[in-house]
Every structure is written in C-alpha cells, then in structure tokens.
C-alpha cells in the first residue's frame, strides 16, 4: 500500500512537471513567433523623407511620406511637404503639398498613384506693367497712357491671387529597398486650377526610407 502510494505520487509529480514543460515550451514558441513577426514588421520601410524637384510642391519641396498600414507596403499612405524661397526685391513664395497616394507592387519596385492639393502663397513685386491704350498730347508732344495692364502671376497656369490652391495628381515609379535606405522616385504630376489643366508637369525625388 505504502509503496503504491509513493509510486502514485511520483507519477503524478512527473506528469505535472511534463505538463508544465509543455506549457513553458508553448509559451516560448508563441513569444518567439511574435518577436520574429514584430521584427519583420519593424523592418518594413513604411516611412520616407525626401527632397523633390518639381512635383506637387511646384518648384521644389521637402517631404515626409508614410503608409497607413505599417504591416504592408502595397497600401495607401499620405504625403506632407513644404517649400519656399525669398529673394531680394521682396519676391517670395511658399507651398504646402498634401497628397494621398497608393503604392502598387512588391519591393523594391512600386508604381505610385496619388491625388491631392497644394496650398501656396506668393509676393511678386516684379510685375511688368505696360500701356494698353492712350493718346498723343499735341501740347506736350508726349504720349499719355490712359489704361495700363500687367502680367498676372502664374506658375505654368495663371493664378488669380495669393493665397491660392492647385490640384495635383501623381503617376510614377518609386524604388524603396526592402530593408530601407536610399530611395528615389520619378513621376508625372498633372496640375490644375480654375484657369486650366496642365498634364505635362513632372518631378524627381531623392531621399531615405525607414
């Protein structure tokens, strides 16, 4: 009886230890899988900073771009930028491009499509005024202008005033290394406003993906 009881206790203890080992092994396996998955997610370069000549920023822009889905590159994202300059004589310009975009493909090669708006303001002190019509004063011997005209500010398309907004589109190629690093992009960026549509504007960008 005593020996049987002792053997029963030993078997029970051994079974509990085996069960605990299985639980520990299972928990460790879950932790390992989660850690590897988290590392893979963290390695996806879903964010980029880049400078672009041309493009939605108009003359140039500094930009930050990110994916809404941090686990997938082939997804929707948002681009935010800023641009500006000022020169002697009082002429200045600034712009803020905002664009939703979608990447299609598999790293490192992506087709990019997007649409958005660029808000901008300017101070153009170099307007060239000219005479539209007038008359010749016989008393003074001089021509007197009665109606002046001026060249309105434009950036490819005529702009009514400052501040203003330009609609933008984006169709292009973006190269992003699968583990992040140097990235570049080239795109066709049609622009439009209430004065017209220009389909042949373009941009080239260089930056870093992380």
Image: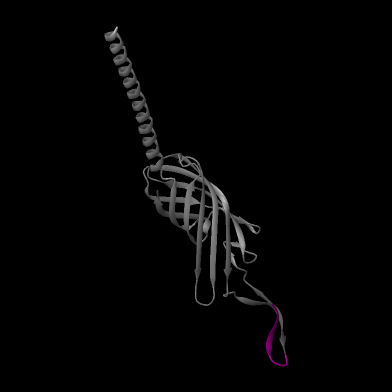
Q: Residue furthest top?
A: 1
Q: Quadrant of the N terminus?
A: top left
Q: Residue at x 34, y 20 (%)?
A: 16
Q: Is residue 131 left or right of residue 101?
A: right
Across and down, in percent, residue 130 comes to 64, 77
Q: Relative to 125, is 49 above or below?
A: above
Is residue 122 something one can see in this rendering? yes
Across and down, in percent, residue 38 comes to 40, 38
The answer to whether residue 44 is magenta is no
Q: Quadrant of residue 139?
A: bottom right
Across and down, in percent, residue 184 comes to 41, 51
Query: What's the image's color scheme?
Result: one colour
Across and down, in percent, residue 160 comes to 65, 65
Is residue 197 something one can see in this rendering? no
Q: Residue at x 31, y 12 (%)?
A: 8
Stretch of the chain drawn in magenta: 138-147
């Amino acid at each position: 009886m005593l020996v049987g009881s002792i053997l029963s206790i030993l078997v029970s203890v051994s079974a509990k230890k085996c069960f605990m080992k299985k639980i520990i092994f299972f928990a460790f396996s879950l932790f390992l899988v989660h850690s590897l998955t988290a590392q893979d997610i963290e390695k996806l370069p879903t964010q980029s900073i880049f400078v672009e000549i041309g493009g939605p920023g108009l003359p140039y822009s500094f930009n930050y771009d990110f994916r809404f889905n941090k686990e997938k590159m082939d997804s929707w994202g948002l681009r935010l930028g800023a641009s500006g300059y000022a020169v002697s004589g009082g002429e200045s310009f600034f712009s803020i491009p905002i664009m939703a975009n979608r990447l299609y493909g598999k790293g490192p090669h992506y087709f990019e499509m997007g649409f958005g708006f660029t808000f901008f303001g300017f101070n153009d002190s170099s307007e060239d005024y000219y005479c539209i019509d007038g008359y010749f004063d016989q008393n003074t011997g001089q021509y007197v202008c009665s109606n002046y005209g001026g060249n309105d500010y434009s950036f490819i398309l005529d702009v009514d005033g400052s501040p203003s907004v330009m609609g933008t589109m984006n169709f292009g190629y973006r190269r992003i290394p699968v583990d992040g690093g140097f990235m570049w992009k080239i795109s066709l960026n049609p622009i439009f406003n209430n004065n017209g549509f220009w389909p042949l504007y373009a941009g080239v960008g260089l930056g870093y993906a992380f």
